[in-house]
Amino acid sequence: MSETVEEQQMRIAPKSIPSATNSKWWLFCLAIVVLKFLLLALDPLPKLYLGHSISYIWTAIFGWIPEDRSFFYGYVIRWSSVWTGSLTSLLIVQVSLSVVIAIIVAWICRAIFDLPGRLAYLFGFLCSIDPLQLAWERYVMTETCSLFFYALVLQQSFVYLRDRRLITLLLIQILSVITIGFRMSFLIVIQAMAVALPLIAFLAGTEPTETATAVRLWRLQFLKRAVFWRHLAASLVTMFLLDQGYQHAYGFVSDREPAHLYGTGYFLLSIWAPALQPQDAADPRLAEIIKHGSEFKLRDISLRNAQRFAPGHLIDRWLRAETDRRKSGKIATRTALNALQRDPAAVISLAAKTYFAYWSGRSVRKIAKADLKIGAFPPDSGFKILAERFNWAARSQQQTLTTWYYVAGSPYFLLVLLSPLLSLVLLFIARNKAHALLLFVHTTVLFAGTFLLSLFPVPRFLHPLSLLTLLSLALAMKSLLDWRSTAQGEGVVWLRREWCAQTSKD
């Protein structure tokens, strides 16, 4: 048994760890580094996504913690840019992380999917020029940092499917919590995978036996194995403890009670505002506000952002009715979840309308351009601090190479929007079902969470789905190569049989 495992490791090792003499691999890595930093030299201007970026900068300078955003990124700005007095150093960090992301994609394609080297390098290159990556590398936003850790989660998840080592599973949970510390939108998929990953690994590793009964039930045989339950328990317990640790850390730096985010309830209430009914309210005062929703157009799907932020709309009225932020947030969360439980179809309908907005009405180019906030500028107070701390001189954001490329490449976003369909097809055509199932779960859960929690079409939210799309395309390519190889092999066998048959007749 040990000899078999050792032989398997010897076959895997050359693909998993690039040899120091593998000049093609290191040449690819060097090419990605040169490409990314050449593009940075051509477009070196930091960009702000007003509201979000200012919040992170305030965290970096003053230690202020926003109630509706993950807080890790503010400390990255502090450690990379406050002491240098320039946001350019932050861009260098983000471009460096983006280089590693592209290399991780190529590594997965080569070492895990077993694609030929040239194709693996091609997908790494495509990742490096992904318009969603290039544009947001230039913004003072969490996208690149969060995607870096998410890419590590995916990479280690594939390694776990291959090796099923408990230490790898625990490392995944650590990386997962760091990921949500940068971007809370990953929370749902991270928590789902704490359960799904051991299931996928052991389900794929089960082999049928010879008896008829066992053949029918072979897929469930892993449930009888103690090692599976150890892995599942370790995954859940580790995720729970690390998640609790994150919540307490967030509460500590905010000087409040432990939580993921304090503004979650307000966002859920505004996102699902058109589906709310007075009976959903967990407080009679909120029920009265919802009852008179026509006064501030509660049912208008296009005004959901206004329901969250505009004076005189839903959240503003509720915060004036209940001034205790802790209590008002809990009531808002409970009310939103009551609406989801009462009429899930109405909430799903809102998500579907947000999705189909990409395909009808405004073109995807216009949506992409609006997402970049070109021409926006910070208020005078914010501009003064930016000028003093980071030598910021621009009064407004201008169109640059990467923002132009983002808009020009926006038709690619439509392919990303079809990623759940692609991952579904992989379940049928991929030879390695574990790889296909991992991508399917990540894609569908992240896709559903993205649109259920979107106020309006925001291409920026497709950022992690783009990475999953490239990996799904790579696995689809591997599947096609496998099927072609099989077909050619069967053709050769048929020709040999025909030749042997003809020879025997002669």
Image (cartoon, rainbow, N blue to C red):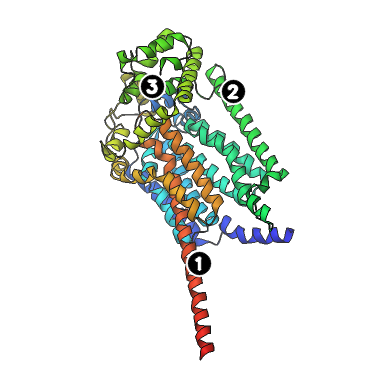
Q: Closest to the observer: 318 or 216? A: 216
SS of the residue under disc 1: helix
Q: Amino acid at mark 3?
A: Ala
Give the mark nearer the N terminus: 1 vs 2: 2
| Residue 397 place in picture, x, y as percent | 29, 32
At x 27% / y 34%, what residue is drawn?
Answer: 398
Determine which residue is flagged by label 1. 486
Where is 479 relative to 243, above or below?
Answer: below
The image quarter containing residue 50 is top left
Query: Which residue of the protein is positioned furthest toward the bottom in this rendering?
Result: 506
Q: CA distance from mark 1 to mark 3?
A: 53 Å
Tell us which disc is closer to us: 1 or 2: 1
Task: Compare marks 1 and 3 and give the one earlier in the sequence.
Answer: 3
Q: Secondary structure under badge 2?
A: helix
Asked if residue 212 is positioned above or below residue 334 in the image, the reply reads below
Amino acid carrying mark 1 in the image: Thr
Q: CA distance from mark 2 to mark 3?
A: 30 Å
Q: Position of residue 127 (x, y in %)?
A: 42, 49
- Residue where numbered disc 2 is placed: 248
One can see residue 66 in this view:
no
Q: Which residue is mark 3?
A: 273
Specify the amino acid type for callout 2.
His
Q: Earlier in the sequence, mark 2 or mark 3?
A: 2
Figure check: 266 above or below 138? above
* Closer to the eye: label 2 or 3: 3
Residue 27 percent location from the top left of the image: 46, 58
Graded by Cα atoms within 10 Å as few (under 14), some (14 to 19) or many (20 or more), the crowding at tag 2 reads some
